[in-house]
């Protein structure tokens, strides 16, 4: 079953783009076709690293957002997954579009799963924003809550929160994303490289060393094991 994956968390700096890039690499390595959309006008980091798979989309207009669902316009076309890397503070226009379009029900009728990913740091803001996300959409979509260990280590507030309990009561999934070594991530970013390119490039000023490449491979393997438990078709 194909899926639309809204990679959010609402505030900046919680790792949304890294999660989108990681999910893109997962689909590539699993040979699952997908289309990506980048909503960040200032950084466009998803498009930067996966230019062959992602395109910018404007969330301020329904015409822009309609491009996301247009992937499924042709019922005879091969079904594919969609990844939407949500910029900070895009929750309100996205919610209006989803509700006015009755998107979750429409996608269900087409056999497409709708997943809302909530990237969380260890702060209270992430808990409050998760509560708002679940209150906005209720039952219907899947909620995937990601404890980003690159943005904190103590997630006790999230784990004990009513917000997380509400998400889990609706069938929500919870996973932890390990931190990739900071120096390695900086090198990958300077290369504008996909994770695949990073582990297959051994020359150049920002190339990863042998052990760095091995750590990236291990990081991907562990993330993929978590992703295998999710409703990703």
Image (spheres, helix red, strand yellow):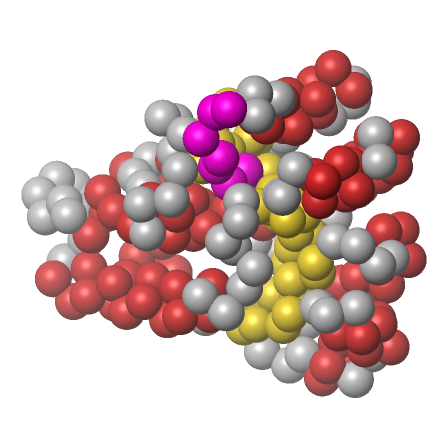
The single residue placed furthest to the top in the displayed view is 63
User: In this image, 50 relative to 98: left or right?
Assistant: left
For the point 25% across and 63% down, the residue is 217
- Provide the major secondary structure of the magenta segment: loop
* 201 inside magenta stretch: no
Name above or below for residue 146 compared with residue 11.
below
Regarding residue 26, the answer to whether it shows in the image is yes
The picture quadrant where one finds residue 65 is top right
Query: Total number of numbered labels?
Result: 0
* Residue sitting at x 79%, y 84%: 160
> Furthest-left residue in view?
203
Residue 183 placed where, x, y %?
Answer: 33, 58
Q: Is residue 139 above or below residue 229?
A: above
In terms of depth relative to the viewer, which is nearer, 170 or 195? Answer: 170
Q: Which residues are magenta?
A: 76-83
The residue under the point 14% across, 58% down is 209
* Above or below, 58 relative to 203: above
Rendering coords of residue 212 (x, y %): 21, 62
| Residue 17 visible at all | no
Residue 117 percent across, percent down from the top left: 65, 55
The percent coordinates of residue 87 (x first, y second) are 66, 38
Residue at left offset 42%, top offset 44%: 24
- Give 212 or 176, whichever is nearer the viewer: 176
Residue 145 lies left or right of residue 198; in this view the side is right
């Amino acid at each position: 079953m194909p899926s639309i994956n809204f990679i959010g968390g609402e505030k900046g700096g919680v790792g949304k783009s890294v999660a989108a890039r990681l999910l893109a690499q997962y689909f590539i390595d699993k040979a699952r076709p997908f289309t990506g959309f980048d909503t960040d006008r200032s950084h466009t980091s998803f498009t930067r690293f996966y230019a062959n798979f992602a395109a910018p989309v404007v969330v301020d207009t329904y015409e822009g957002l309609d491009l996301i669902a247009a992937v499924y316009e042709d019922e005879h076309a091969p079904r594919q997954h969609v990844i939407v890397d949500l910029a900070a503070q895009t929750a309100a226009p996205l919610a209006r579009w989803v509700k006015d379009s009755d998107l979750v029900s429409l996608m269900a009728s087409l056999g497409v799963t709708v997943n809302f990913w909530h990237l969380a740091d260890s702060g209270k803001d992430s808990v409050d924003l998760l509560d708002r996300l679940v209150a906005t959409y209720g039952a219907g979509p899947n909620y995937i809550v990601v404890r980003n260990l690159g943005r904190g280590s103590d997630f006790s507030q999230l784990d004990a929160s009513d917000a997380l309990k509400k998400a889990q009561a609706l069938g929500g999934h919870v996973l932890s994303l390990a931190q990739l070594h900071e120096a390695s991530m900086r090198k990958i970013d300077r290369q504008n490289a996909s994770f695949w390119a990073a582990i297959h490039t051994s020359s150049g000023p920002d190339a990863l060393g042998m052990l760095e490449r091995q750590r990236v491979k291990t990081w991907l393997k562990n993330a993929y094991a978590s992703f295998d438990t999710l409703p990703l078709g």
